[in-house]
Image (cartoon, rainbow, N blue to C red):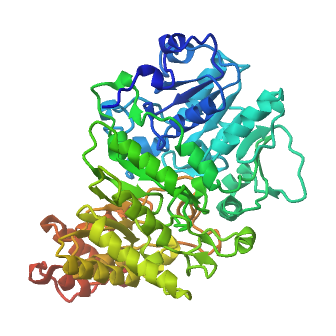
Amino acid sequence: MKTYKPDAWLPTTKKEIEARGWDYLDVILFSGDAYVDHPSFGTAVIGRVLEAEGLRVAIVPQPDWRGDYRDFKKLGVPRLFFGVSAGAMDSMINHYTANKRLRSDDAYTPDNRPGMRPDYPTIVYTRILKELYPNTPVVLGSIEASLRRLTHYDYWQDKLLPGILALSPADLLIYGMGEKPIKELVRRLRSSEPFETIKDIRQTAYITDKAEKRADDIELFSHEECLRDKLKQAKNFRHIEEESNKYAASRILQKVGERVIVVNPPFPPMTKAEIDASYDLPYTRLPHPKYKGKTIPAFEMIKFSVNIHRGCFGGCAFCTISAHQGKFIASRSKESILREVKAITEMPDFKGYLSDLGGPSANMYRMKGKDERICARCKKPSCVYPDICKNLNADHTPLLDIYRAVDHLPNIKKSFIGSGIRYDLTLHHYADEPLNKAARSYMEELIAHHVSGRLKVAPEHTQDSVLKLMRKPSFSLFKRFKQIFDRVNRKYGLNQQLIPYFISSHPGCTEEDMAELAVITKGLRFHLEQVQDFTPTPMTLATEMYYTGYHPYTLEKIYTARSKEQKLAQRQFFFWYKPESRQPITQALRKIGRTDLIKKLFGHHAPKITDEKPPKHLRRR
């Protein structure tokens, strides 16, 4: 059994620092999450990257931001800078439900305890640090800062907020996956460049009193213009999304009051060697010993899983993955993946079952453009919508090789795929027949050998008009995939479930669309479980449609359910099979003039109705 010593973790207290014989620190990282030394937790990754650069690094997890700020004082002042992260999630999604109700738990805190971080920790922590140490630079990171780097709609305050650097007194913001920019920052500081003069590192943003505009810069409408005119906010978003998904992106400028936020273009995608180097760092893969006897649910969920790539070229309208990680896939080597799997098999409580070999989308491993010169000129946010790009090499063979290599390792009984798959990639007819053959082999291998009883997929809706706004494929593809899933189950004598995910109240979705969804999914014998009400999150296409009422690419007006009543009216159709839902759904169908759907949903259980039609002004369509 492997023994883990406290000094195997990055230090979190003065005592742990002294145990290493250190008399100073180079960087101190503050995080809204508990400290889990695992490559799925961003603060641990950045800490290990800095350590590998030869720096002395400490982490202060979940500091108490109330009272005397002792957690912010206990380690003193770092030689280079403070780093601040809200954690692995945006704090507002972590704290509140889609109905804006305060959650009673926090999966990134020991024993699910709520209340261990403030709303917007990136702002709160930085203000405290600057109050205590005004001359020490602060660098922001994490998904909260990344997705709020420019003017954005905040669902929880129901208003347009400026880029987070206008609210947080931080000196620099790193967006996206932070290994490359943080290493470049350290290199520049070590070469004796003053922090305040470092303004040109890729994948960073800063705020300044004056920015000299270059010929290829994109200057957005100012924050104040967007406050006055929602159409200008919609137009801004198209530039932001396109520049976030380009090989050769432009610098983006946006005025906020008398100041300017400057967003430098992103780094190119990480190479295989670069991403391997990040995952091969000496993580203990465990929570810090200070949490002994406590459970951190977010860790328990991923402790026996392996992330094999980053990035997603799906470009789904409601998803933040491509906005943060980018659309280009950065894949680990087979050797690096197998090294991590072997490390998992040595964990004391491992029983032989890997919970996931996946990524943002499970089956995009090593997929990229056939001719990368075409990719270099492309600014489309999705490689699969409205059609799968002819330049995409969607070969599933490397992924099959990974699955088989993992399953042949000693102490591995079974490897499961817990990440959602893109079934449109497996069902598309490619011009190259080997790709079609590999896709068919992948589907059978996946369904027959890598499903832990339930396979998650995300059709998200059934109606093409809504799916178009979601940038998702037609529901007919899901039906084809279900047929294959059922056939493979019969072939191997399995009794596995297909678990589809659906969203209500997405921009463009109406009650009538939800009623059709209920009828269609009933016909497929689904009693839906994995459903959610659309939650607007910063920097997504769907959120811009929700807030502005316009589609940023076409500028057409889009209907969106906004009030609590409108949202609940849509959500109830997910649960048509519950007896208590029959009466309100029947009333709703009468109101929108779709009494024809009542019998389809409820059969002989349908509440009695008359042929009386609702007044014309009450019909939705």
Query: In the image, 211: left or right of 63?
Result: right
Q: For residue 102, say whether it is visible.
A: no
Percent position of residue 453, x then y: 23, 63
Query: In the image, 85: left or right of 234?
Result: left
Residue 217 appears in which quarter of the rendering? bottom right
Above or below, 29 against 356 in this view is above
Residue at 26%, 61% (x, y): give it.
452
- Which residue is farthest left? 604
Query: In the image, 529: left or right of 425?
Result: left
The quarter of the picture where the N terminus appears is top left
Query: In the image, 618: left or right of 193?
Result: left
The quarter of the picture where the C terminus appears is bottom left
Residue 57 appears in which quarter of the rendering? top right
Percent position of residue 425, x then y: 47, 76
Q: For residue 325, say whether it is visible.
A: yes
Number of numbered discs overlaid on the protein picture: 0
Q: Residue 608 versus residue 93: which sits nearer the camera?
A: 93
Percent position of residue 151, x then y: 66, 50
Q: Residue 80 versus residue 143: which sits nearer the camera?
A: 80
Percent position of residue 222, x then y: 75, 52
Residue at 65%, 62% (x, y): give it.
241
Residue 509 appears in which quarter of the rendering? bottom left
Above or below, 500 against 47 in this view is below
Residue at 60%, 63% (x, y): give it.
327
Residue at 66%, 27% (x, y): give it.
54
Above or below, 588 against 263 in this view is below
